[in-house]
Amino acid sequence: MSLPPLSPEQRIKPSHFELRISLIFATLFVSQGTHLPYFPLWLQAKGFHAEQIAVILAAPMFLRVVTTPMLTALADRAKDRANVYIALVAASMTVSAGYFLPATYAIVLAVSLLLTIVWTPHSPMADSLALSGVRRFGSNYTAMRKWGSIAYLCANMAGGFILAATGPQAVPVIIFVALGAALVAALAAPRMGRPRKASPLSATEIQHKAPSLFNAYFLYFTLGVGIITASHAFLYGFVSIYWKSIGIGDSVVGLLWAWGVVSEVGMFLFFNRIFSSVSVVKVM
């Protein structure tokens, strides 16, 4: 199904579009590059045991499955997605300050649940803005998105050295400051208007395609993705704690996390050159 035509305003490319989206990706991933590897270490330093850490990390994952589609759908209906993105980044910065409160189990869990509601939509909304530029202006997605991976890499390494010097108590401060930087970048987000269509499929087509969700190959694929994601969840939640338990220092923990991102950055740098003529199915 073809999309509706662009309005005259939507045909005009915002100035410095690629630079502004690159800054959004970069600042977005600094906070994530700190939270993912080091937040469990902060929880452990606050005296939480393994079961409590697991709940604090896992409960937001269940919640965001419900809340993220709702908020991204709201953004699609808004006058401009950038305004919703700005509001969510500002809310994330505000909520993250809750980690400065006394670190009781109830408070940390409540802050984590609230934070996941307003924080998780950042990535899909940034992608939405970037991909609108790809479709409308021919922008190179990987050239913009790679700065998120580079920022994540730098946050991994810098966070390790900061924690080695200050201890885990620096984690909430870094997250708060990083979200502040993300807010500054969000204020410069290009105004793209509403997406021309929330889905390329009509309601009739969605109903017609629904049985495909129960196709055996699709179910096997979904199961495989689920297993991969589950293994990542365990790794992300406890690998930093494990490395620390066997005597690995904070700075080295940061380097180990960063090493995995190097390959991702390389993929974004060379993906188009290597796979531009290969179908998605063959790449997978």
Image: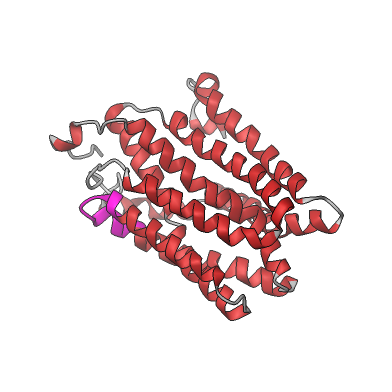
Give the quarter of the figure containing the N terminus.
top left
Is residue 214 left or right of 105 when viewed as pictured?
left
Which residue is at a point 30% across and 47% down the rendered structure image? Answer: 201
Is residue 80 left or right of 271 when viewed as pictured?
left
Asked whether the viewer can see residue 24, the reply is yes
Asked whether the viewer can see residue 203, the reply is no
26 versus 174 height, above or below: above
| Direction front: furthest residue | 165
269 versus 107 height, above or below: above
Predominant secondary structure, magenta span: helix
Residue 220 falls inside the magenta stretch? no
Is residue 168 left or right of 282 when viewed as pictured?
right
170 versus 201 height, above or below: below
Is residue 5 left or right of 143 when viewed as pictured?
left
| Direction left: furthest residue | 8
Q: Which residues are magenta?
A: 72-83
Which residue is at a point 72% across and 41% down the rendered structure image? Answer: 255
Which residue is at a point 49% across and 23% down the rendered structure image? Answer: 272
Give residue 50's position: percent from left, percent from top. Answer: 74, 71
* Number of marks in picture: 0
Q: Nearer the viewer, residue 101 or 60?
A: 101
Q: Nearer the viewer, residue 64 or 117?
A: 117
Give residue 197's position: percent from left, percent from top. Answer: 25, 46
Give residue 187's position: percent from left, percent from top. Answer: 32, 48
Give residue 168's position: percent from left, percent from top. Answer: 69, 60
Color encoding of the figure: secondary structure
